[in-house]
Image: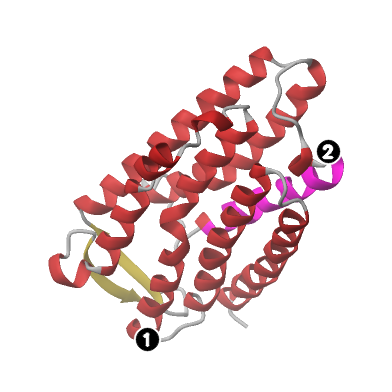
Amino acid sequence: MGYNMVLSAILIIFTFCFMVLLHFSWKNRETPISISYGLGVVAASFYTFGYAFQLVSTTMEQIIFWIHVQYIGIPFASFIWVIMILQFTGNQRLVTKRNVALLSIGPLYTLIAHFTNGWHYLFYKGMALDYSQGFSLIILDRGPLFYLHIGYVYGYYLVGICLLIHMYLKSNREKKKHVVLMMIGSLGVFVVPFIHSIDVIKIPVDISPFGLVISGLFYLWGIYQFNMLKLSPTIN
């Protein structure tokens, strides 16, 4: 059995774990953060599930299909995350229809740029298959529209981290634990994909979905340990 099969199985298992997290968020849906958290879990599930099957695909057509599945969730992950952080840090008043519409411009841009790539080849300039690892891997030549997508994603991340740092500085000792947990969980969502995007470490597979797995574990622990989905955002 190739290690792609092992990685695929891990991602499928954690996709089901994400469904457990979705169940918790649904049970606590009376709180706004539970709704945004649940939507974030759904977005992550498209990524992990799609990449699980991409790893075991053998043709270019199959791989492209599963990349499309991933991009149902990928564009909305950072968008949903920054809304969740606004709610978590007590800035629910900023989650207005106008602000949500403005924030949604980024993910809608990515969605359109990705699914129309066959017309302009500016998101991905080219694709090729690599069999050096013993299974089919796709090599993507990223275009300018892809890097524009990366730019706004990390713009959202910077805003969210600044809000968390501000909350940490203003919080009491007990509340700081919750903020730190949120920060650590966020590392898997943004830092791991960033490492992969800029090729800091030469790893043949996309490690971004596994960053979501790490975040999922932290958030699951937070739900059990601190009842995170019912935390009051009030800073004390």
Figure quadrant of the C terminus: top right
Left or right, residue 130 beside residue 31? left
**Residue 85 drawn above or below residue 221:** above
Q: Secondary structure at mark 2?
A: helix
51 or 165, nearer to the observer: 165
The image position of residue 43, as x and y in percent, is: 53, 60
Mark 2 or 1: in front is 2
Tell me the residue at 63%/20% (across/down): 167
Quarter location, residue 218: top right
Q: Is residue 218 visible?
A: yes
88 or 201, nearer to the observer: 88
**Residue 221 drawn above or below residue 54:** above
Q: Total number of numbered labels? A: 2
Tell me the residue at 46%/73% (across/down): 133
**Residue 170 drawn above or below residue 122:** above
Q: Is residue 232 found inside the magenta-colored segment of the image?
A: no
**Amino acid type at mark 1:** Thr
Left or right, residue 207 beside residue 202? right
Which residue position is annotated with label 1?
Answer: 59
Query: Residue most toward the left?
Result: 120
Tell me the residue at 64%/33% (across/down): 88
The image position of residue 152, as x and y in percent, is: 34, 41
Which residue position is annotated with label 2?
Answer: 226
Q: Secondary structure at mark 1?
A: loop
Q: Which disc number belongs to residue 110? A: none
The image position of residue 68, as x and y in percent, is: 38, 72
- Number of other residues with Cα within 10 Å of mark 1, as a class: few under 14, some 14 to 19, many 20 or more: few
**Amino acid type at mark 2:** Phe
Left or right, residue 129 beside residue 96? left
